Image (cartoon, rainbow, N blue to C red):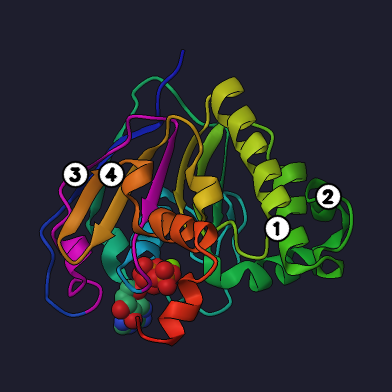
Amino acid sequence: MRGNYIRSIRFQEFPHHKYPFNIKAITTLPEIEFTTPVTFLVGDNGVGKSTLIEAIAVAYGFNPEGGSLHLQFETHATHSELYQYLTFVRNAVLKPKDGFFLRSESMYNLTSTLSQMGDETLENYGGSSLDAYSHGESFLTLFMNHINDNGFYILDEPESGLSPEAQMALMVKIHELAEVKGSQFFIATHSPILLSYPGATIIQLSEQGAQLVDYDSVGFVQLYRRIMNDSDYIQRLFNND
Ligand SMILES: Nc1ncnc2c1ncn2[C@@H]1O[C@H](COP(=O)(O)OP(=O)(O)OP(=O)(O)O)[C@@H](O)[C@H]1O
Ligand SMILES: [Mg+2]
């Protein structure tokens, strides 16, 4: 049987107007509905993507610093109180076996914690110290080796440090987990490569709130196209044309 584990997320009344409840894109959010196995979150820097994604991850039971569901460690908690004001509408029948939260700011903390944890844990995460890998390699190694089951996966800018080829390898893995194993993904991204995942839902956050958009109308997709199709585009930017 197929379907999403988390069918939607509802918001309770917020208690005050300071951070994170001063973020327009979040306070104007209606219910978030998950209708496809892969859902992307896009929007400008500072619009509120990580704040939202971290709140969802913490409310779901992940460590605020990221990792799998059983991994509990604390370095420096910086997540907001938004997680207390979310309600999940869960699938009554489907239960995920696994899960992983990639927090964009804490990949380093996560990999060094795993490195300090003895061989058994490291076996699961690729068999050697993740510190020995480059930024992009450490996430890719961890994801390719550790993640094999159906699960709920929350990834904040997983493209960070990944070459286009590595992003495509990641997409093949996401496809396997989503289509073959029945996993659910919620991914914040600035990558036009990841965002091109066929059949995904794209939620765009902005000062006006949240909108469902299609790939071709996403601002950074249009901008990449203009830059790559027009060799003078950046020179004109310098000239203020
Ligand atoms: N601990 C905090 N206290 C107060 N404001 C914060 C805190 N953390 C983030 N903010 C503010 O909340 C807003 C949303 O930040 P957030 O990190 O969610 O943005 P984002 O959409 O993930 O951006 P990016 O694309 O750069 O990752 C920003 O204006 C940011 O400065
Ligand atoms: Mg962010």
**Residue depicted at x 61% and y 64%:** 160
**Label 1: few (<14), some or many (≥20) within 10 Å?**
few
Which portion, as a residue range, is magenta?
19-45
Of the pair 57 and 102, the residue shown nearer to us:
102
- Is 63 situated left or right of 218 in this image? right
Label 4: state its secondary structure: strand
- Is 180 situated left or right of 189 in this image? right
Q: CA distance from mark 4 to mark 3?
A: 16 Å
Q: Earlier in the sequence, mark 1 or mark 2?
A: 2
Q: Residue 129 at x, y = what percent?
A: 86, 63
- Is 13 situated left or right of 140 in this image? left
Callout 2, which amino acid?
Answer: Gly
Label 3: state its secondary structure: loop
Q: Locate the C terminus by quadrant.
A: bottom left
- Mark 2 vs 4: CB contact within 8 A: no
Q: Is residue 62 above or below residue 78?
A: above
Q: Earlier in the sequence, mark 2 or mark 4?
A: 2
- Mark 1 vs 3: CB contact within 8 A: no
Q: CA distance from mark 1 to mark 2?
A: 20 Å
**Which dot, 4 or 3, sits closer to the camera?**
4
**Residue depicted at x 30% and y 69%:** 47
**Which dot, 2 or 4, sits closer to the camera?**
4
